[in-house]
Structures are given as C-alpha cells and as structure tokens.
Amino acid sequence: DVDLNEIIHLSNLAKAQGEKLGLERSLLSTVLSHSDKTFLALLGPRGVGKTVLLKQAHARTVDSVYLSLDILPRDTK
C-alpha cells in the first residue's frame, strides 16, 4: 500500500523536477488554463512529453498534486 506521506513526498519531488526543467512545453499555457478542473489527464504515445508537461504545470500551481499511477500497487487478482 502507498500511504499519503509517500504520495506527498513524490508529488514534492515532481514539483522540484518541474521547476528545474528548462524549455517549457508549448501546451503548458493550455494545461494551466484548465487549472480550475478537478482532474487533468493527458493521453498520447510514449516519449512526446506528457510527464514533463504535467510536472511543469504542477510546478506552477499551488493546489495541485502530481500522482503517477506507476506507484500504485498492482491488482494481482
């Protein structure tokens, strides 16, 4: 199980990474314009910059949490 402290820690790491990333993605302003939404998901092929874009958006917002679904335990049923 993943506890809340770990999620917060990983979210803070993602925010720090987003602050350090150089070139802003062209869609960043579009993503930030939807910051009033409860959830935001990006879909696309591997390697197009979805993770970088979300980390950059997370770094520029105060009330966001970055949660990668890769950290959640797999259902082994």
Image (cartoon, grey):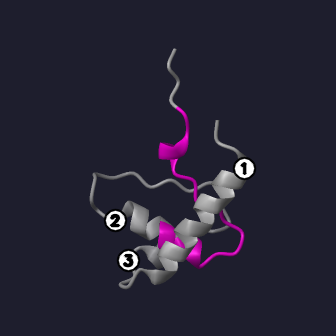
Mark 3: few, some, or many residues within 10 Å (few <14, many ≥20)?
A: some
Magenta part of the protein: which range? 55-73
Kind of residue sitting beneath label 3: Arg
The vertical placement of 70 against 41, above or below, is above
Badge nearest the viewer, 1 or 2: 1
Image point (62%, 68%), residue name: 12
Mark closest to the chain's N terminus, 1 or 2: 1
What whole-number distance in Å separates the C-alpha atoms at marks 1 and 2?
27 Å
Image point (48%, 74%), residue name: 17
Secondary structure beneath dot 3 equals loop
Which is more toward the observer, 5 or 70?
5
Q: Are marks 3 and 2 in contact (CB under 8 Å)?
A: yes
Image quadrant holding the N terminus, namely top right
Residue 47 image offset from top left, x and y in percent: 27, 59
Secondary structure beneath dot 2 equals loop
Mark 2: few, some, or many residues within 10 Å (few <14, many ≥20)?
A: few
Q: Which residue is mark 2?
A: 49
What whole-number distance in Å separates the C-alpha atoms at marks 3 and 2?
8 Å
Image point (41%, 80%), residue name: 21
Residue 66 image offset from top left, x and y in percent: 58, 60
Residue 2 image offset from top left, x and y in percent: 64, 42
Mark closest to the chain's N terminus, 3 or 1: 1
Kind of residue sitting beneath label 1: Leu
Kind of residue sitting beneath label 2: Gly
Q: Which residue is mark 1?
A: 4
Q: Which residue is mark 3?
A: 25
Residue 25 image offset from top left, x and y in percent: 38, 77
Image point (52%, 14%), residue name: 77
